């Protein structure tokens, strides 16, 4: 990367923007708030599992959100992050301007914003994940400029690596399943199933008993213990029962603590709670970057660096091949995965749970691709563009709107504010989201008719460029 110290970067001019990216960013943000609102009614410990207490319309909405929203829109947003990276890098290369140090500052500022958001408002923040992953992605770009790897330093190579990386868990689980099927006969399956039933029954029996005042920590090494297969059946069963009893009680304790803090009247207690969770969140960020964000960034990079997104009208066949199979096959696979995951037997059978997870993960990738293809195809039609373009200002102010959504939800739900934590049904939550989105879409349109950037986007840019950027549209450049 050429880095001339005598030239500087500047924010993207309106004429240089790729309009469909702003629309896609707005669509992604719509999906994200529909998902995030559940954090304000249930503990994070419970969120990975379906809320089995739902009935009627609430049940239908819960199912719809999990099938068509959960895990899809943050992937679309990550794809857009990779696209934005490519836009900035290519503009810098074309102008012979510096990029590396500037981008590091940009990510460090985003990291600071994300951590402040995480600590002061809500521990579901994803901005610090994107910032960390962005720094890793910059390192990736520099790494592939090394002579030995330079032949892979192409958009097409990045696309192949990214797709292979995303599909690796699916391939590994498939091969493990094939191996298990070929090496295990019917009698062994029945024996294993009976073992799992016995363990589950005893775990449930012990959980029904009053918990001791001091709950033992689960043996974190049990699931990978080298000696577990050397134990006799009764010893192994007892250790596994103890592990799951302690694990379930730990989850219950964590959920109770979170609910008490978030529904309580002390803001400082909530901040302290989120600070204590930071070390565990940091470990999750590293894993999230390596196994999800970085490969999606690579795919997003390809969409811009290859010219496909800017000239999307010339690539209708590609986006059609994403939209139709992605939406149809993604729906079938996702629903199949959820039926398995939410079946009571999946709580007992690790094999059935793994199969459901495999399908649900694949469905997330397919539906995210389907949403991308569908939006691009709709944008090419006058009616579709007229409707979806209303989301462009909302998408251009994505950082401001993302943080604003949290502020509104905190003020409504947390105990030290509105106090509605856990009191609002899923149906009512959807009405809250619609009201928030309507307000933000109107506000974003009004704001960008008068200002160049959203408030937080302006602060982000000013901190990145180390100088105050002009904000009003009539102010001098």
Image: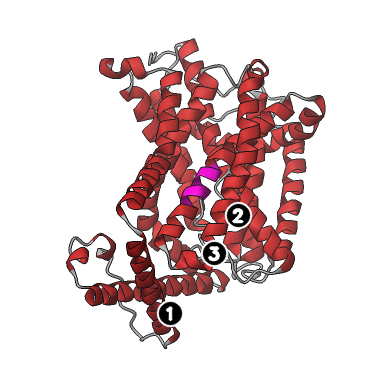
Dot 2 or dot 3: first in sequence order is 2
Residue under the image location 51 percent in, 48 percent down: 359
Tell whether position 399 is magenta. Answer: no
Q: What residue is shown at x 41% (from left), y 45% (from top)?
A: 288
Q: Is 193 situated above or below 159?
A: below
Write down the region rendered in magenta: 357-364
In the visual, does 434 lie left or right of 306? right
Query: Would you name the residue on which mark 1 appears?
Result: 204
Tell me how far mark 2 sits from mark 3, CA to CA: 15 Å
Q: CA distance from mark 2 to mark 1?
A: 27 Å
Give the quadrant of the C terminus.
Answer: top right
Per the image, the residue denoted by label 3 is: 343
User: From where the camera sits, is residue 347 visible?
Assistant: yes
Residue farthest to the bottom, as pictured: 210
Q: Is residue 7 left or right of residue 38?
A: left
Characterize the magenta stretch by its predominant secondary structure: helix
Write down the quadrant of residue 30 in the picture.
Answer: top right
Task: Check if mark 2's residue and mark 3's residue have beta carbons within 8 Å.
Answer: no
Name the secondary structure under disc 2.
Answer: helix
Mark count: 3
Q: Residues within 10 Å of mark 2 (few under 14, many from 20)?
A: many
Q: In the rendered image of this protein, does residue 470 appear above or below residue 53? A: above
Q: Residue at x 33, y 52 (%)?
A: 180
Q: Quadrant of residue 418?
A: bottom right
Q: Say few, some or many: other residues with alpha carbon within 10 Å of mark 1 (under 14 / 14 to 19 / 20 or more).
A: some
Mark 2 vs mark 1: give the one in front.
Answer: 1
Nearest to viewer (mark 1 / mark 3): 3
* Mark toward the viewer: 2 or 3: 3
């Amino acid at each position: 990367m050429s880095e001339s110290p005598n030239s500087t970067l500047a924010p993207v001019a309106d004429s240089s923007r790729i309009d469909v990216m702003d629309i896609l960013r707005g669509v992604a943000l719509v999906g994200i708030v529909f998902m995030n609102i559940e954090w304000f009614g249930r503990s994070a410990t419970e969120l990975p599992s379906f809320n089995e207490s739902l009935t009627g319309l609430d049940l239908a909405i819960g199912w719809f959100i999990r099938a068509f929203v959960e895990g899809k829109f943050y992937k679309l947003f990550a794809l857009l992050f990779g696209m934005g990276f490519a836009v900035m890098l290519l503009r810098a290369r074309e102008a012979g301007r510096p990029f590396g140090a500037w981008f590091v500052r940009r990510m460090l500022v985003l990291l600071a914003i994300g951590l402040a958001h995480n600590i002061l408002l809500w521990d579901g923040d994803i901005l610090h994940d994107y910032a960390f992953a962005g720094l890793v992605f910059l390192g990736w770009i520099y790494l592939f400029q090394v002579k030995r790897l330079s032949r892979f330093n192409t958009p097409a190579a990045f696309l192949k690596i990214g797709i292979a990386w995303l599909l690796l868990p699916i391939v590994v689980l498939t091969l493990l399943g094939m191996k298990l099927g070929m090496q295990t006969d019917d009698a062994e399956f029945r024996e294993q199933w009976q073992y799992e039933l016995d363990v589950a029954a005893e775990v449930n029996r012990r959980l029904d008993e009053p918990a001791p005042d001091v709950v033992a920590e689960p043996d974190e090494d049990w699931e990978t213990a080298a000696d577990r297969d050397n134990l006799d059946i009764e010893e192994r069963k007892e250790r596994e029962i103890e592990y799951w009893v302690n694990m379930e009680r730990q989850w219950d304790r964590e959920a109770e603590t979170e609910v008490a803090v978030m529904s309580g009247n002390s803001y400082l207690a909530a901040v302290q709670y989120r600070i204590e969770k930071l070390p565990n969140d940091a470990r999750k960020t590293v894993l999230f970057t390596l196994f999800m964000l970085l490969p999606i960034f690579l795919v997003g990079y390809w969409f811009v660096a290859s010219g496909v997104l800017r000239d999307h009208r010339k690539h209708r066949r590609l986006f059609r091949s994403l939209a139709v199979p992605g939406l149809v096959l993604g729906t079938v696979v996702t629903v199949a995965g959820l039926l398995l995951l939410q079946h009571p037997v999946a709580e007992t059978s690790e094999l059935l749970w793994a199969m459901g997870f495999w399908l649900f993960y694949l469905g997330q990738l397919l539906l995210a691709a389907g949403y991308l293809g569908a939006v691009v195809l709709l944008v090419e039609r006058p009616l579709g563009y007229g409707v979806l373009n209303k989301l462009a200002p909302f998408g251009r102010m994505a950082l401001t709107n993302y943080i604003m959504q949290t502020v509104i939800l905190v003020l409504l739900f947390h105990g030290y504010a509105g106090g509605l934590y856990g009191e609002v049904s899923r149906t009512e939550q959807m009405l809250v989201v619609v009201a928030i989105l309507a307000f933000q879409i109107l506000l974003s349109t009004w704001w960008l008719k008068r200002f160049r950037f959203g408030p937080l986007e302006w602060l982000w840019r000013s901190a990145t460029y180390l100088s105050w950027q002009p904000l009003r549209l009539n102010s001098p450049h």
